[in-house]
Amino acid sequence: MKISDAATEFLSKKRIAVTGVSSKPAGHGSNAVYTRLRDRGYTVFAVNPNAQTVEGDPTYPDLAAIPGGVDAVVIATSAEHAPQTMRQIIDLGIGYAWMHRAFGAGSVSDEATRIGRDAGVMVIDGGCPLMFGTTSDGGHRMMCRMLKMTGKVPREV
């Protein structure tokens, strides 16, 4: 599936968890994703086992603690935590996962990608939800084009 089609499908989900949202938001991509989704009308849930609140909202220690569950998850923690998060996504029957990555290693884990895809989860392994659709802006769209050339944003998932 082309990345643009996968992004459209992912962003059609309205209840989205974002893992790794920090109580110290400066420079955290997870916080930018969380607040942009919230500001664009999504029902978002911040997941951080080490904080009570972030961005003025309550946090949840893990995906299972979110009341009513979610339809999709943005994994924005370090890549070493991604396989564990992917297993929880599978256990909870969540069908969509996006491992955030722009510059650097980001949250992408080959192991998590394999685990998720083997279980039927639609996994986007790179890029950022803010690069696509109504959540995007000019800067993110420009980064998307550039990062596709380096492989940090996959062309297909």
Image (cartoon, rainbow, N blue to C red):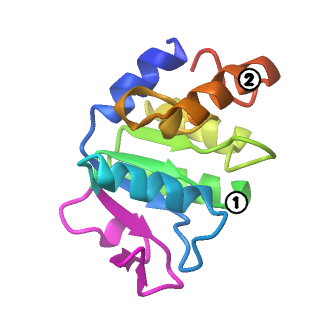
Q: Reply above or below: 107 against 95.
A: below
Q: Which residues are magenta?
A: 44-69
Name of the residue lying farthest toward the front: 138
Do labels 2 and 1 touch, CB within 8 Å? no
Q: Position of residue 114 (x, y in %)?
A: 63, 34
The residue lying at 46 percent from left, 28 percent from top is: 132
Q: Residues within 10 Å of mark 2 (few under 14, many from 20)?
A: some
Whether residue 79 appears in magenta in the rendering, the answer is: no
Who's the residue at 58% across and 43% down the image? Answer: 99
Q: Which residue is mark 2?
A: 146
Name of the residue lying farthest toward the top: 2
Specify the label residue 78 is tagged with. 1
The residue most toward the left is: 68
Disc 2 or disc 1, which is closer to the eye?
2
Q: In the image, is 34 to the left or to the right of 149?
A: left
Which amino acid, mark 2? Met
Q: Residue at x 74, y 23 (%)?
A: 146
Residue in the foreground of this view, choosing between 136 and 120: 136
Quadrant (top left/top right/bottom left/bottom right) for the C terminus: top right
Closest to the observer, 129 or 117: 129
Q: Amino acid at mark 1?
A: Ser
